[in-house]
Image (cartoon, rainbow, N blue to C red):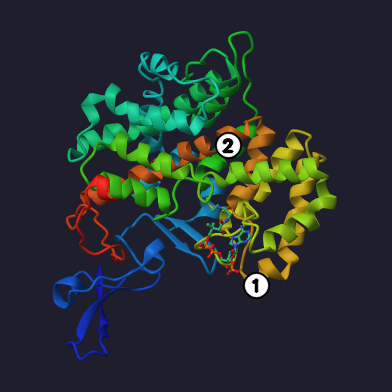
């Protein structure tokens, strides 16, 4: 962190002594005011629920400029990565800081490919779930359970353990997600096939059966690979911060990533793609395009709590660059699958147009986010809605690991322990039960 020449001074109206606070500059983006000594010097905490103005760490991995609509992984714009790289190159970049050269890429792909199988016992563990369990419930369990199956890579303070667990997690997530899917639909699990690429292998594990081989289609494989790239990391979002906080206690990497999966499940975060598609289906059921006006009215009504899912973002207040790329992929996939006239897609396009012109959304800087389109793409690929968030988790695993490893390797790292403003009862005495 580079100290700035500028200092902040905090003064108090009650005559308490003022305090100088150092400011640090990043390579890009807003400076930060260092408040670490605030409590020791003033006896006061800062108050920032939802982390609206708080940087919880310094990081070299991902940079977002929400006003410009820019997303960089290790400095590279997401548009260039989506065009020139595949998902495993992106994983290498996020984990190691640089894009691989051809030899490094071959070695990395081989390494990941050699870890795609999961311990055979895991399928018996999986069989303990109800068939109708939500895939994210299954994934939270399976990822956490990896720590029980791979004891030799659970020491977060050992760099080799961190490296092996990283490769295992990236390699095994597609196998686990497709197992969760197959279990839910009552089909046999399909083992990974190492002659295929990461994404083609995933599609095959999803859609092949013992009676019918799956022939990977380039456009569709490229689409799922792009979904993985676009979701691979997104700096200190809720699930990543969860992974960092969970891992800060020294817990094992599988447990920390399972915490990330659990957090991602929520509809305000990774669950939004599922929620967006369910919303489209609901509008469709109620009458389709003609009902959009009525739906938008409900969204604007403060008492209704209805939101336009797939719109808005905490950081992007101009546009979500991932949404632009996913919109392109959406058109490619719908052309390749002959679904361009699909009523749900037409409804989505009509909704997008109306929302982009409506003053409610324009004035609040609410634009479609990546999830508005990724649900439509995944649906066209034949992926059921309930699996969308699990696919997001698969893709984000590399980002979680990169962020977790960065934190552990940081000499300044400490267990995360937020403070609070207590507003409950002050000390009081217990009245015995009979007298209450
Ligand atoms: N539909 C309708 N109104 C909205 C929406 C929406 N999707 N999103 C925000 N607003 C409104 C809010 O009601 C608020 O209005 P007000 O100023 O009149 O009170 C204003 O816009 C600002 O919204 P906030 O909730 O303060 O924005 P915040 O940054 O906290 O929330 C969030 C961002 C959670 C993503 C929100 O926009 C949302 O819930 N969107 C729908 C869910 C979604 O698509 N999430 C995916 C995020 S992307 C991802 O995880 C990959």
Please determine whether, in this image, residue 252 is positioned above or below residue 10.
above
Where the N terminus falls, by quadrant? Answer: bottom left
Question: What's the distance in space between the residues labelled 2 and 1, CA to CA?
Answer: 33 Å
Furthest-front residue in view?
Answer: 435
Spot occupied by residue 34 in the image (x, y as percentages of width and height): 25, 72
Ligand 1 shows up in which quadrant of the image?
bottom right
Spot occupied by residue 402 in the image (x, y as percentages of width and height): 34, 46
From this viewpoint, is residue 192 visible? yes
For disc 1, the marked residue is 363
Q: Does residue 265 appear left or right of residue 143 in this picture?
A: right
Which residue is rendered at x = 26% and y = 62% of the image? 419
Tag 1's secondary structure? helix
From this viewpoint, is residue 101 visible? no
Spot occupied by residue 103 in the image (x, y as percentages of width and height): 37, 36
Which residue is rendered at x = 29% and y = 33% of the image? 165
Q: Does residue 185 appear left or right of residue 342 in this picture?
A: left
Please determine whether, in this image, residue 181 is positioned above or below residue 353.
above
For disc 2, the marked residue is 224
């Amino acid at each position: 962190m580079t100290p700035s020449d500028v200092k902040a001074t905090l003064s108090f109206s009650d005559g308490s002594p003022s305090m100088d606070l150092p400011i640090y500059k990043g390579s890009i983006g807003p400076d930060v005011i260092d408040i670490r000594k605030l409590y020791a010097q003033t006896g006061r905490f800062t108050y920032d629920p939802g982390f609206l103005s708080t940087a919880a760490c310094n990081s070299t991995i991902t940079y977002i400029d929400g006003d410009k609509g820019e997303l960089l992984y290790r400095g590279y714009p997401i548009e260039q990565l989506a065009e020139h790289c595949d998902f495993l190159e992106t994983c290498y970049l996020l984990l190691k800081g640089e894009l691989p050269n051809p030899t490094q890429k071959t070695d990395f792909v081989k390494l990941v490919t050699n870890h795609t199988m999961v311990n055979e016992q895991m399928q018996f563990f999986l069989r303990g779930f109800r068939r109708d369990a939500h895939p994210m419930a299954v994934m939270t369990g399976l990822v956490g359970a990896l720590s029980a199956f791979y004891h030799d890579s659970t020491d977060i303070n050992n760099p080799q353990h961190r490296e092996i667990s990283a490769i295992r997690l990236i390699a095994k997530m597609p196998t686990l997600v497709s197992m969760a899917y197959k279990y839910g639909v009552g089909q046999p699990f399909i083992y990974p096939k190492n002659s295929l690429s990461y994404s083609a292998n995933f599609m095959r594990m999803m859609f092949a059966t013992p009676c019918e081989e799956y022939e990977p289609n380039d456009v569709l494989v490229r689409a799922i690979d792009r979904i993985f790239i676009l979701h691979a990391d997104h700096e200190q979002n809720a699930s990543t911060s969860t992974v960092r906080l969970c891992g800060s206690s020294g817990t094992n990497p599988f447990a920390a990533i399972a915490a990330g999966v659990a957090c991602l499940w929520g509809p305000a975060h990774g669950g939004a793609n599922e929620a967006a598609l369910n919303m489209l289906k609901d509008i469709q059921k109620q009458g389709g395009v003609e009902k959009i006006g009525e739906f938008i009215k409900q969204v604007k009504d403060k008492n209704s709590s209805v939101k336009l899912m797939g719109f808005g973002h905490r950081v992007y207040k101009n546009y979500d660059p991932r949404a632009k790329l996913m919109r392109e992929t959406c058109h490619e996939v719908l052309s390749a699958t002959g679904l361009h006239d699909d009523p749900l897609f037409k409804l989505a396009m009509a909704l997008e147009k109306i929302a982009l012109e409506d003053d409610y959304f324009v004035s609040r800087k609410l634009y479609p986010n990546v999830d508005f389109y990724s649900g439509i793409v995944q649906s066209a690929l034949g992926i059921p809605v309930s699996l969308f968030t699990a696919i997001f988790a698969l893709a984000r695993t590399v980002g979680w690991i990169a962020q977790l490893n960065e934190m552990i390797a940081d000499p300044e790292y400490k267990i995360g322990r937020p403070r609070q403003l207590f507003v409950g009862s002050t000390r009081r005495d217990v009245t015995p039960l009979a007298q209450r």
